[in-house]
Amino acid sequence: MISVETWAPNSPAAGTDHLVLAAAARGDRAAFDLLVHRHTPRMYRVALRIVGEPADAEDAVQDAWIAAWRALPRYRGDAAPATWLYRVVTNAALGTLRKRKPTATLDGIADGERMIDPAPGPETAAVSADDAARVHRALNTLEPSQRVALVLREFEGLSYEEVATVLETTVAAVRSRLHRGRAALLTALASDESGWGPR
């Protein structure tokens, strides 16, 4: 076993995610804690964009880490650790959506600031907080398969191949979901009662 001090996030001994994940798979709790430290902010951001509610996103991330811990012995390294964790949190977030009552809405925004991430992604640097909230409102009206593809590709910057790996589908299927998702997103933005763009 490697000590917690050895696995300190800024230590040169911390190594790559592949090494850390391999140590965690062997039962090293400190290595697993380092993975949690490194990847929770990104996983929360993805979950929040999929489920639309901060509390649900926190639950999804917690479920994802539990699932990741249980799945570690079966991790074969077919995908990069970050890609594997995207898959785990995406599945957890989709599970959260499935648990919701059928009457629950997916807009998930009571005010304009709730959906602005604590660690904002590239989109919030280019638009105002109000416009970012509109994008998130529109995003949450999409069907989950389109929403997830858009979150991973457009907000997280994954390649088509990485998105296909996370979603366990083909690149062609990803491109199709993205095409439909972008069109649906533009329609939702156009129909937003509050309008789009600066006033």
Image: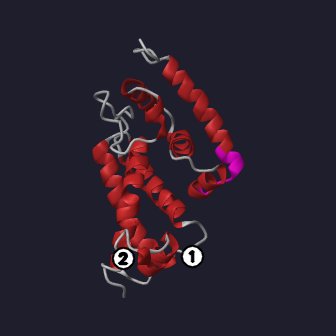
Amino acid carrying label 2: it is Trp
User: In the displayed structure, would residue 3 be above or below residue 75?
Assistant: below
Residue 35: horizontal and vertical position, in percent? 40, 68
Exactly how many numbered labels are in the figure?
A: 2
Would you name the residue on which mark 2 appears? 7
Towards the viewer: 194 or 92: 194
Q: What residue appears at the point 38 percent right and 31 percent down from the top-left corner?
A: 107
Q: What residue appears at the point 65 percent right and 49 percent down from the top-left corner?
A: 160
Q: Is residue 57 left or right of residue 127?
A: left
User: Over which residues does the magenta segment extend?
Assistant: 168-174
Of labels 2 and 1, earlier in sequence is 2
User: In the displayed structure, would residue 20 be above or below residue 104?
Assistant: below
**Residue 76, numbered circle:** 1
Label 2 with label 1: CB-CB less than 8 Å = no
Amino acid carrying label 1: it is Arg
Q: Is residue 26 left or right of residue 59?
A: right
Instruction: Describe the element under mark 2 as helix, strand or loop.
Output: loop
Towards the viewer: 40 or 106: 40
